[in-house]
Each structure stands twice: as C-alpha cells, then as structure tokens.
Image (cartoon, grey):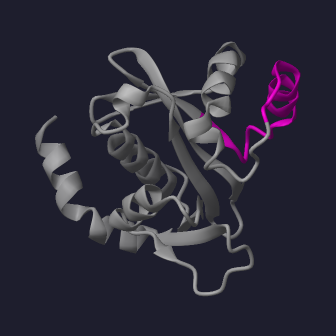
C-alpha cells in the first residue's frame, strides 16, 4: 500500500525496512523523545513486527525523491470509536528542517480522516519536546485537559479542527500539483 501526495510517498512498512527503522529509532535524537527509551535489538524489532496487527496499525516509510527519510504511523486504530494514535519521526537529520515532516503528517492525517473515516487523532508527546508540541499545535492538536503522566502528554485533534487549522496550507499545496 502506498500514499503519494504533495511530492512525497508513504510506503507501507515491510520486513525489509525493519533494520533501517530500528537504526533510526535507536538514535538518541529519536529514542530520547519516545516513551520506551531502551535500545531495541534486531530480535525485538522482528518480534514487534510479527505481532503487529496490520488491520489496526498502519506504519509507513516516508520517502522523498525515492529515498527513505522517516516513519509515520496511525496505531491502535479503533474503528468503533473512529480514533487512532498518530506519530512521526524523521530518521534523516537533513530532512528535519524541511517541509517533509509537515507534508507527511498532513498526508497521513488526510488519509486517516478521508479514507479511514476516523473522527479523532491523538498524539503522545514528551512534555519537554517543545518543537514537537508547537508542530502538533500548528496542525490542529490541542493538549488534553486531564493528564496522568507528566513526562508525556496527550494531544487530540478532530477532522474539523485539523481541516480548519490547515485549510490555507492544504489549499496552497493543492495549487502546487
């Protein structure tokens, strides 16, 4: 499965991608912003992938110019409550301060709302990750009012809020096709 939009490609995660993703995930800039911060072994990665319910967990490699640069996901999709947790990380440091993270995020959120017909997305963000918090707020996420874990906070957005906040960005992107 593949999503091609806004000059990027989101390619469904395959077993052949696991070692690359594991290397990215174990790098300090990514690992230290995750709830699970231990080093992930090859065996752990393979076991995780083998046990992944592919019907409720959508992981995609982000590609620009046919090069893999990161991973974006919708996980724990609840097709009854029409919600999921969304996430992203960029493994190629040169892509961090480009439009790639924004384009990949908008593409996966549009897929979630328009194709999967989800109504709510949540993101779990480290409380000290100011850049990620500001990024998520810029695309419609709002901090949940009640939180259990102070180190990681949940942010939520709805289809309507996402579309309203990103209306001008998406209109500009559509004109660039």
User: Residue 39 lies in what quarter of the image?
Assistant: top right
User: Against 100, is 46 above or below?
Assistant: above
Residue 167 shows in the view: yes
**Where residue 20 appears, x then y in whole percent?**
62, 18
Residue 14 shows in the view: no
Q: How many labels does the image show?
A: 0
User: Against 19, is 36 above or below?
Assistant: below
Q: Is residue 57 magenta?
A: yes
Q: Does the magenta stretch include residue 30?
A: no
Name the residue at 86% across, 28% down.
44
- Farthest residue to the bottom: give it: 145
Left or right for 56, reference 71: right
User: For this rendering, which residue is in front, 165 or 100?
Assistant: 100
For the N terminus, the quadrant is: top right
Left or right for 54, reference 113: right
Bounds of the magenta segment: 39-59
User: For this rendering, which residue is in front, 87 or 9?
Assistant: 87
User: Residue 123 lies in what quarter of the image?
Assistant: bottom right
Name the residue at 72% across, 48% down.
56
Name the residue at 61% across, 36% down.
28
User: Against 129, is 72 above or below?
Assistant: above
**Where residue 8 appears, x then y in whole percent?**
34, 29
**Where residue 141 appears, x then y in whole percent?**
45, 69
Name the residue at 65% across, 86% down.
146
For the C terminus, the quadrant is: top left
């Amino acid at each position: 499965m593949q999503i091609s939009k806004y000059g990027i490609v989101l390619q469904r995660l395959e077993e052949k991608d696991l070692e690359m993703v594991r290397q990215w995930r174990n790098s300090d800039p990514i690992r230290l912003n995750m709830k699970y911060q231990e080093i992930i072994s090859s065996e752990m990665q393979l076991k995780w992938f083998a046990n992944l319910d592919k019907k409720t967990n959508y992981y995609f490699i982000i590609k620009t110019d046919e090069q893999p640069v990161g991973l974006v996901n919708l996980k724990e999709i609840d097709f009854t409550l029409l919600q999921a947790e969304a996430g992203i990380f960029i493994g190629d440091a040169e892509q961090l301060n480009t439009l790639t993270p924004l384009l990949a995020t908008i593409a996966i959120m549009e897929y979630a709302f328009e194709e999967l017909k989800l109504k709510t997305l949540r993101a779990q963000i480290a409380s000290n990750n100011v850049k990620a918090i500001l990024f998520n707020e810029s695309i419609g996420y709002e901090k949940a009012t009640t939180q259990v874990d102070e180190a990681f906070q949940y942010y939520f957005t709805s289809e309507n809020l996402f579309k309203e906040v990103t209306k001008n960005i998406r209109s500009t992107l559509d004109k660039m096709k």
